[in-house]
Amino acid sequence: MPGLIAALSEIVGRPMVDKTGDADAPEPSIFIALREQLGPGLEPANRTLNVLVVDHV
């Protein structure tokens, strides 16, 4: 959480304060946190992507 607060402070240009109060709780993965907070069923997956690499022009 401290890293997120620092990044948000830089982005918005104002100091941010962490008031979550869960400093001792273990951090869930992003997928568990999103499912609990928003409800979507996100699962990590591997996918093949097409990539074009230009080595020399």
Image: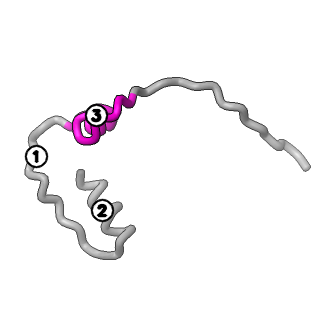
Q: Which residues are magenta?
A: 27-42
What's under tag 1, amino acid-wise?
Asp
Q: Is residue 33 above or below residue 22?
A: above
Determine contact: label 3, label 1, CB under 8 Å: no
Q: Earlier in the sequence, mark 1 or mark 2?
A: 2
Report the residue at 31% width, 68% height from top: 9
For disc 3, the neighbor class at 10 Å (few under 14, some 14 to 19, many from 20) is: few
Quickly name the residue at label 1: 22
Disc 2, SS:
helix
Distance of mark 2 from mark 3, alpha carbons? 25 Å
Quickly name the residue at label 3: 35
> Can you tell which of label 3 and label 1 is closer to the viewer?
3
Report the residue at 27% width, 32% height from top: 32
Report the residue at 78% width, 38% height from top: 52
Disc 1, SS:
loop
- Does the magenta portion include 31? yes
What's under tag 3, amino acid-wise?
Arg
Residue 55 is left or right of residue 42, and the answer is right
